[in-house]
Each structure stands twice: as structure tokens, then as C-alpha cells.
Image (tube, rainbow, N blue to C red):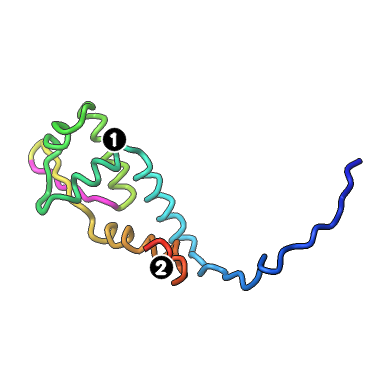
Amino acid sequence: MKDRTIRLRPEHCCADVIEPAALTGDDQVRLIATFKALGDPTRMQIFRLIAAQSQPICACDIVDRFDVSQPTIAHHTKILREAGLITSTKIGIWAYYQVDREGAALLASIADLLLDFPEVAAAVA
């Protein structure tokens, strides 16, 4: 049988532990969907390409920049749309994509939600 000795904690341990602000269920679901959507390297690159444009970008221009098929691009843009990060408009047979401003605002607020403490935010700045 193992000897279970009681170890004293250092004085600084557990002192003034600050609890983060609570996230609502909706916030958690949206954050998880955003992280999942951007967790794939190709989707991250597609999102960054779309976000860099001042005008909507045609799906054909996205396909031209990646070494994947058009159906694969369509799959990735569908996930980005479902996560609320981009919007699409269909003109004829072509889809045009642009960043969803509300989704972009969510991305900007993610750091605030996750790094809710001035000390932490200052440490990573």
C-alpha cells in the first residue's frame, strides 16, 4: 500500500483565484462552432482569403488558389457559412463569398471572452 502523506501547499497556491465570467449556452455553442470551423488549415486559409477581400470573391477564384477540387472548396465554405463566419450570394452558377460582419465581430470578441482578465490580456499583448 502506498504511503499517503499530506503535502502542504505552497502559500501562493490557490490564493485569490479569479473565476471567469460565465458563458451562456449559446455563446459556448457559437464559440465551439467557430473553433471547429477554423480548426482545419484549409478552412482557415479560405477564411483569411475571403476576409482579405474588399468585395465578394467568386468561388472560382478560391478554387484557383488551392490544390483541391471545387466540391472540396464547396464543403469548406459550407462549414464556414454554417459557423456564421462568411455569407454567400449566388449569381448565375457562381457563388460569391464575403465575411459575415457579425461573425467577424464574434472573432474579435473571442479573445475578450477567453481572456476575461486584464492581467491575462496584458500578459499576452
Q: Could you say which disc has been placed on residue 122 in the image? A: 2
Instruction: Name the residue at 46% across, 66% down.
Output: 120
Q: Considering the image in quadrants, where does the N terminus appear?
A: top right
Q: Is residue 89 magenta?
A: yes
Instruction: Name the residue at 11% across, 37% down.
Output: 61
Instruction: Name the residue at 46% across, 70% down.
Output: 119
**Main SS type for the magenta part?**
strand
Q: Amino acid at mark 1?
A: His
112 in relation to 79, above or below: below
Q: Is residue 30 magenta?
A: no
Foreground disc of the pair 1, 2: 2
124 in relation to 37, above or below: below
What residue is pinned by disc 1? 75
Q: Considering the image in quadrants, where does the C terminus appear?
A: bottom left
Q: What percent of the width, then of the height, locates residue 102? A: 27, 61
63 in relation to 1, above or below: above
Q: What percent of the width, then of the height, locates residue 96? A: 13, 44
Mark 1 and 2 residues: CB-CB less than 8 Å, in contact? no
Frontmost residue, 61 versus 71: 61
Frontmost residue, 106 versus 75: 106
Tell me the element at label 2. helix
Q: What percent of the width, then of the height, locates residue 62? A: 16, 37
Instruction: Name the residue at 65% across, 71% down.
Output: 15
N-term-proximal mark, 1 vs 2: 1
12 in relation to 35, above or below: below
**Dot 2 surroundings within 10 Å: few (below 14), some, or many (20 or more)?**
few
**Dot 1 surroundings within 10 Å: few (below 14), some, or many (20 or more)?**
few
Q: Amino acid at mark 2?
A: Ala
Q: CA distance from mark 1 to mark 2?
A: 38 Å
The range drawn in magenta is 85-91
8 left or right of 74?
Answer: right
